[in-house]
Amino acid sequence: MVKFKFIYDMENCIGCSSCAALDSKNWKMQPNGKSSLKDSKEIDAELFEKEFPEENLDKNLETARSCPVNVIHIHKDKNKII
């Protein structure tokens, strides 16, 4: 089974809020001005991951591409897509 997931680097987020504007189901803005990936787990200091189903791939690719500092990545199995 193919697994897709977000990898989010919160440390380098600049808080532009494009992710939260495009996808409030997965993203929200925090009081510190940065985004957070809802229901994710921290895998390293300020590095988070969250799996999602293939049917959400197009929307999640759009969200990742909207990030001006490229801190939202999408992986398929163990390979980075974006």
Image: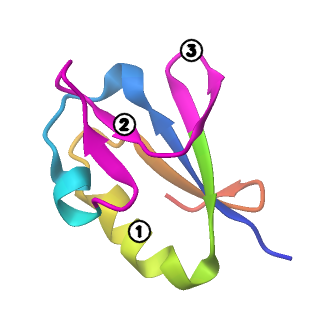
Residue 33 point in image, percent of width and height: 17, 25
Query: Which residue is under mark 3?
Result: 45
List the residue tagged with mark 1: 61
Category of crowding for the residue at label 1, using alpha-carbon neighbours closer than 10 angstroms: few (below 14), some (14–19), many (at least 20)? some
> In this picture, which residue range is highlighted in magenta?
24-48
Residue 9, percent from left and from top:
45, 31
The amino acid type found where label 3 is placed reads: Ala
Of labels 3 and 2, earlier in sequence is 2
**What residue is disc 2 on?**
36
Q: Residue 15, which numbered label?
A: none
Residue drawn at (19%, 22%) of the image = 31
The answer to which of marks 1 and 3 sits earlier in the sequence is 3
> The residue under label 2 is which amino acid type?
Ser
**Tag 3 near tag 2, CB within 8 Å:** no
Mark 2 or mark 1: whose residue is earlier in sequence: 2
Quick one: SS at disc 1?
helix
